[in-house]
Amino acid sequence: MAGALNALDFLSDTPDVAKVSAIAVVGDEPFLARQVVLRLRQVVLSGGDAEFSLATFDGREAQLSDVFDELQTVALFGGGRRLVIVETADDFVTRNRAALEDFVERPHATGVLVLSARAMPSNTRLYKAVQRVGMIVDASVPAAPRLKKWLGVWAEQAHGKSLEPAAADLLLELVGPELGLLDQELAKLAASLGEEASISVDLVTDLVGGWRAKTTWDMLDTAAAGDAASAIGQLDRLLLGGENPIGLLAQIGSSLRRFAAATRLVNLAEQRGRRANLRSALEEAGFKSFLLGKAEGQLRQIGRQRGEQLYRQLLEADLALKGASAAPPRLVLEQLIVRLSKQAAPAKTTARSG
């Protein structure tokens, strides 16, 4: 977003807004946008009567005249400026673009206008005007490395607990890049700790993953380790618990595709005359650092020959579950697991070292 200030930068080191008359908070991450707006309320308004200088509108229903009236009204107490916030402002901007452009070019000294919208094209006159007389704050979902860093900082700031890096990785894998949901899970985790100071991987597994997620991971680990009988027992429990076979294949596939990618990277390195590093290949394929030791042992058990076949086998299983085969869904998944078993491993004389 051209010339925009990243929301995480704004929250960690809020710039001086004393002379700013218009601010656009733009992005599709509602929790992050909300935190920016809350911070603006703190820095623009001050004193015990600050709430009397605040007006908030829903942009889907707000009338331009009401918003402008609030902006031109002198603050009742303290002589400070009024803060006028238009939330979900996309429709409001569309309906009143020309008037808003004129206002931003000739703002009122009595008020600060905040437009919180999902989108505001950077090539529009309004965007450029707000950028010139105020600021644009980008409230889009942060990139993964930055999101993980924020998660650790937020756990300390908002919930008073440290977050182990491996626990942050796992939390992001379970919940996804939804900051509001991540905050809720952190609150639950922090509350469960009592006087303990740190959120661990085990705690995230137990409280966020639940038994279904834990059983799915156990099934994947057990299958990759070559114990088909135990893995099929765990699969049976998941299916009886109501898990969708296609959803289970998606979870199985996400791990097995990483093993397939690591196998391909090892092969590529050797084709180029380089000595292959299995752990580096697994890391490049997407395995988290805290899983590398276990993943290395699992890929050695799977072996190169079966690792090279995983992409094709996953495609066949996906097509079968979606109607290309008359086989029951349970059988399709069981066959995939059995192919990873120690019993189904190629003979040592025909397999190259993984």
Image: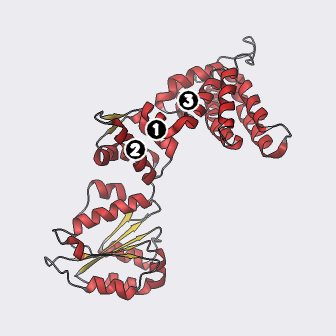
Hey, what amino acid is under mark 3? Leu
Mark seen at residue 282: 3
Which quadrant of the rendered structure holds the N terminus? bottom left
Q: Of all residues shown, which one is farthest toward the left?
A: 78
Q: Position of residue 348 (x, y in %)?
A: 72, 11
Going from N to C along the chain, the mark reached first, 3 or 2, is 2
- Residue located at (66% from left, 25% from top): 231
- Residue located at (40% from left, 44% from top): 188
Q: Of all residues shown, which one is farthest toward the right?
A: 326
Q: Is residue 257 above or below residue 293?
A: below
Of the pair 150 and 239, the residue shown nearer to us: 239
Distance between mark 1 and mark 2 Cα atoms: 8 Å
Tell me if I can see residue 303 in this picture: no
Say whether residue 250 is left or right of residue 322. left
Kindly indicate whether the residue at mark 2 contacts the one at mark 1 (C-beta within 8 angstroms): yes
Is label 3 or label 2 in front?
2
For the residue labelled by badge 1, is the local secondary structure a helix, a strand or a loop?
helix
Q: Which residue is mark 1?
A: 207
Q: Position of residue 276 (x, y in %)?
A: 58, 23
